[in-house]
Each structure stands twice: as C-alpha cells, then as structure tokens.
Image: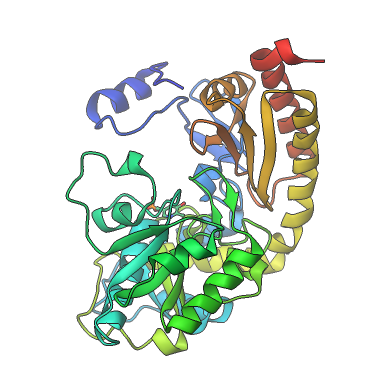
Amino acid sequence: MSNERNDETAALCADWQMDTYTRTATIVKGRGSRVFNPKGQQYLDFTSGISVVALGHAHPAVVEAIKTQAETLVHSSNLFYTPQVGLLAKKLSEVGLGGKCFLANSGAEANEAMIKLARLWGSRNGGRYEIVSMRGSFHGRTLATLSATGQSKVQTGFDPLMPGFAFATLNDLESVRAAITEKTAAVLLECIQAEGGVVPATEEFVTGVRALCDEKGILMLCDEVQCGMGRTGKMWGFQHYGVEPDAFTSAKALGGGLPLGALLASKALSGVFGPGSHGSTFGGNPVACAASLAVFKVFEDEKIVENVPALGEFFRRGLQQYVEKYDDLLEVRGKGLLIGLALKEPRAGELLDEMRLNGLLACKAGDSVVRFLPPLNVTEKDLEEGLEMIGDALSTVFGGDEE
Ligand SMILES: *Cc1c(COP(=O)(O)O)cnc(C)c1O
C-alpha cells in the first residue's frame, strides 16, 4: 500500500499532517456499511473505522444521541457530575465486572490507566510493579503502552522504553510462569491479538493464566480495546473462555464513533484509585458517553451481539473456500467478525490495494494478514458482495495459482 494523492483533500492531509499514516482513499461520507469518496463513488467498508463504528456509519440512534447531547451540554469537565457519565458508568459495571470504571478518550489512555492501577495496587501489595505482556501484542502508542506492546516495530527509536515490562509468548503458559518474579504485579493480554495478526489465545492458555495469577496473587488484565464490544460474538473476548480478569479496558467501538475509552475494574480493585490518583480533562465527555449509551441500547434492541456468530460463520465459510482454492493463502482465523485471512507471503498490502480497486475496504494486521472488521450489523448480502470482491482481487493477485 502506498500513500495516494488522488485529490485536494489527500494533498492537504499529506502536506500539513505529519507523515505518521499510510493512507489511501479519501472518504467524505458514510452510511451503514458503505462510505463514499468526493466523487460519490462508494466502497463497502469492512474496516468500520478500525472496529470503531460497530453499528455502521451514521446509525440513526447514535446520530440522534450525539445531536441531542451536543445541543444540551458538550463539556463540563470532571469538576462536576453529568447525567450521561453516571448512566454510562453504571451500564459498564452491569456489562463488565460489577465494579467501577475510569473513563478516558482512547485505547492507549485506557491502558495507561490500567497500568497505573496495577502499579498502585502493586505498590501496596509487596512493592510489585512489573507487568508481563505478550509478544505480538498491541496496546497503544503512548510511551507506557508502546513499552507494553510486544512488537519492536512500534518501539524502535523511542529508547529508553519505560521499565517494568516483561514479555511472554501467547499460548505458552510456561513462558508466562517463567516471566513472573516477586516484582510482578500483573499479566496483561488480548484474548485475540488483533493488530498482531488476528491470533486467538487458546482456552487452555487463558484459563491457565487466570489460575496462575490466582496462584501467585497477582492481577490478570485484559485489553479488550479491539476484541471487546461484541466484535467476537460475545460482549467481551474473555467471555469465550469462561474467566474474568481483575480489570480490562475498552475503547474503539465503545463511543459509537466518538473518542471514548474505559478501564473497568472488579469490585475488589474499584477502590485502588482515590482522589488525585488519575485524571483526564476530556475523559467521560458527555457527548461521547451519550453516544455510548445509544450503542448499548441498540445492542440490546437489535440483538446485535447475538447475531455476530452466525454472520462471522457465514463470512468465514466464504473465505475458507478461497483458502482451499489458492495455494498462496494460509488460513482463516479469528472469532465472530474479527477475521484474519492469513497469506503465506507478506503480500497483504497488494491484496488490499486490489480489493480497494474493486470497491472493498479492509485492514492489515502485519504484512501477511488481511483483517476484516465489518460492522456488527452487516447483512449477509453485504458479506456476500464483499466475498465476491475479495474473490476478484485474489484472482488478480494470485491468479496464476488458480486450479
Ligand atoms: C487500537 C488498540 C489500542 C490503542 O487504541 P487507541 O485508541 O488507538 O489509543 C490498544 N489496544 C488494542 C488491542 C487496540 O486494538
């Protein structure tokens, strides 16, 4: 994939924004599972803004909630109580761990809050501060969260990294046990590594980590920023494994498209932070909270999460047929509508470019995996249309291998 400068907007962004992103199409409007470029051409959007607009673009209930709240109160700061903030915090406790939350503006910030929580807890429980994180993980781009991330590509050049992180290997319980010392406060993991290539943790591993944390008297922390909010067919990724972490983070889809992140803690950890322990000027912005409440309401009214497994299965079956047809494809993996098509060679960018030419947008997860994140309320018809475009792109890129 390369930066494209197809129009005035692309030129403006490229000329005046720092060069941190690889961008392609220009998008000016979105409706449901489709987005439009300035010429009015449409794309089927299987990125959902990187798993953010889980209900598709411009869901009427989310738009209405944002409009109403914007007209009423946009911001008042955390010096004061605001109804939407309280209502959302209660909702998060109900769907989360039954404890309290801290509201932030992004995934990285939510993870920063979780790291601080673990350190404060550890400082009061035997002077523990170290966090064992997984190789291949992704936790954000702030200094603490990139130090927690198990991928050197986000760390290179930013030394010295923040101390206090050790690394283990996903699905290798013994590596976690070996990484734990008397200084370890917590183990941190994504139940499905998303950016790291759509790699699900095994049941044996996740239940094993839970048991290991209990045995050692340390915290189990989950990063649900991408695999949470119904994306995998349950509200939270860890629910597939029948365990509960001591705390976890949410963001991406949480705010219905607006910037919102949350740290959700168990009852036992809900009192670790006190006045002055942590804070954020924008965290728990009333408009973002109102949008989030609308998302949870639509989830319930339209049985969104309940429908994800069948939609995911339908899409997987289609992709599986391509895996059987093309030698260059390795496998389909993931859960629900967090799906990766793994290639044998690092050619995901080429395939994405070709899919985009056919009218379909998707993400990468490393150079060898194409990651599909359709809206959770996508129709089978849209999935079918997407599968056709994927088929056309595969035949262009890997056509030589067609049997
Ligand atoms: C996207 C992501 C983050 C970072 O979220 P930002 O909102 O970009 O800061 C953290 N963890 C996971 C698992 C993510 O997918």
Specify the farthest residue to the top.
400
One can see residue 400 in this view: yes
Nearer-the-camera pick, 13 or 245: 245
- The image shows a total of numbered marks equal to 0
> In this picture, is 150 found above or below 102?
above
Query: Which colour scheme appears in the figure?
Result: rainbow
> In this picture, is 399 found above or below 133?
above
- Left or right, 52 with respect to 372, comes to left
Nearer-the-camera pick, 397 or 124: 124
Specify the farthest residue to the left.
160
Horizontal and vertical percent position of residue 348: 55, 27
Quadrant holding the C terminus: top right
Q: Which residue is painted at 35% across and 32% down in the image?
A: 21
- Left or right, 154 with respect to 90, comes to left
Nearer-the-camera pick, 251 or 71: 251
Q: Which residue is painted at 73% across and 14% down in the image?
A: 401
Horizontal and vertical percent position of residue 118: 33, 75
Horizontal and vertical percent position of residue 339: 64, 44
Horizontal and vertical percent position of residue 230: 62, 61
Q: Which residue is painted at 56% across and 58% down in the image?
A: 171
- Left or right, 328 with respect to 102, comes to right
Q: Quadrant of residue 77?
A: bottom left
One can see residue 69 in this view: no
